[in-house]
Amino acid sequence: MKKYLVEFIGTFFFVLTIVMSVNSGVGNVAPIAIGSALMVMIFAGGHISGGHFNPAVTLAVFLRGKCDASDVPGYMIAQILGGAIAALTAGFLLGSFPEGAVNITTADLSDKVGPALLAEFLGTFALCYVVLQTATAKGTAGNSFYGLAIGFTVTAMAYALGGVSGGAFNPAVAVGVSVAEMVSWNNIWIFLVGNFAAGAAAAFAFKFVNDPTDN
C-alpha cells in the first residue's frame, strides 16, 4: 500500500504541474517545470516505489522483470487516480481553465492521427528506455543521476514532440489533461495506444541491447 500511495503522490504533483504551468501562461518554459517536477518526485519516491508515475513505465519495468505482476494493477490505478485528481485540483485552483491559455495543439487530433501516434510512441519510448537503463540496469546500479536523466528526457521530448501530439508520453497524464479539458476525450486512444506500445517496445529493446545477465 505504501508503494501505491507514493505512486499516487508523485503522479499527482507531476500532473498538477503540467496542468497548472500550461494553463498559467508560462509559455515555452512549461516543459522545464514539468521535467523538474518529475525529477524531484522520482528522487523523493524512487527508493520506495521505483518512481514510475506512469502506467507505460510500469508496463516497461514489468516486462523488463523488475516489477511484480501483483503490483502492476495497483500502480496503474494509483497513477490514473493521481492524474485525474490533480486535474480536478488544478481546476479548483484556477477557478476554471482559462479559454485560450492552453497552448498545446491537441484539442482535436483527428486530422493528424498518424503523426500524433508516432510522436507519442517516440517520446514514451525514449522515456521508458532511459528509465530502464538508468534505474534498473546493473551497469548503472546505485547511481545518483537517474532522476535528473528521466526528468530531462521528458523536458527534451516535450520540446521536440509536444507540438505534434501535446507530449503526454504517459497514460496518467493523458487522463489528467483530458479531465482538464486540454485535449478531447475522443483522442484518448491515441495516447493509450502510443504510450503502452512504446513501453513494451522499450522493454524489448532493453533486453536486446543489454547483457543477458542483466535481464
Image (cartoon, rainbow, N blue to C red):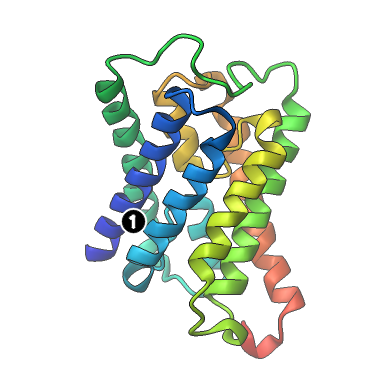
Can residue 194 be seen here? Answer: no
Q: Which residue is drawn at 63% across and 58% down?
A: 200
Query: 9 or 202, which is in the foreground?
Result: 9
Where, quadrant-wise, is the C terminus in this rendering? bottom right
Question: Residue 42, image x and y in percent?
Answer: 41, 62
- Helix, strand, or loop for circle 1? helix
Question: Residue 157, image x and y in percent?
Answer: 66, 46
Question: Residue 108, image x and y in percent?
Answer: 62, 16
Q: How many labels does the image show?
A: 1
Q: Which residue lies furthest to the left in this view?
A: 1
Q: Say if 102 sits above or below 38 in the image.
A: above
Going by the numbered disc 1, the residue's amino acid type is Glu
Query: 24 or 75, which is in the foreground?
Result: 24
Q: Which residue lies furthest to the bottom in this view?
A: 213
Question: Residue 192, image x and y in percent?
Answer: 56, 39
Dot 1 corresponds to which residue?
A: 7
Can residue 166 be seen here? Answer: yes
Q: Is residue 133 left or right of residue 113?
A: left
Q: Quadrant of residue 52?
A: bottom left
Q: Residue at x 53, y 56 (%)?
A: 151
Query: 172 or 47, which is in the foreground?
Result: 47
Q: Residue at x 62, y 86 (%)?
A: 139
Q: In this view, does 207 lie to the left or right of 92?
A: right
Using a 10 Å C-alpha cutoff, classify the residue at mark 1 as few (fewer than 14 neighbours), some (14 to 19) or many (20 or more): many
Q: In this view, does 106 lie to the left or right of 54?
A: right
Q: Say if 95 sits above or below 202 in the image.
A: above
Where, quadrant-wise, is the N terminus in this rendering? bottom left
